[in-house]
Image (tube, rainbow, N blue to C red):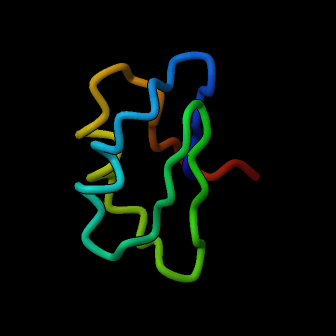
Amino acid sequence: MFVHDASECEGCGECMRACPTGALLVSIGYVEVDASKCRACGACAQACPTGALRMEPKRG
């Protein structure tokens, strides 16, 4: 599951550049994910310099 903490996001776009499927759209403090493109590979979370993105196991 993709988790985004807007309070930590600087809108740098590193996550968007790291995404191999082009599933992310970045704006200042906001990341939009195209669920049909996201493979949950975690590349975006690894690239995020502030820790605003992370992947967590799906609950339930």
Residue 29 locus on image (x, y percent): 59, 31
Locate residue 32, reporting x and y percent. 61, 56
Judge from the rendering whether residue 4 lies leftward or rightward of residue 49; answer left or right.
right
Report the number of discs: 0
Relative to 43, is 22 on the left or the right?
right
* Residue 26 percent across, percent down from the top left: 49, 49
Q: Residue furthest front?
A: 28
Name the residue furthest right.
60
Residue 1: x, y in percent?
Answer: 57, 52
Q: Which is more toward the observer, 8 or 26?
A: 26
Residue 34: name its quadrant: bottom right
Residue at image point 62% right, 27% down? 6
Q: Residue at x 25, y 70 (%)?
A: 20
Give the side of residue 1 with respect to residue 37, left or right.
right
Rendered view: 17 above or below 7: below
Q: Residue at x 55, y 34 (%)?
A: 28
| Residue positioned 45% across, 24% down in the render | 10
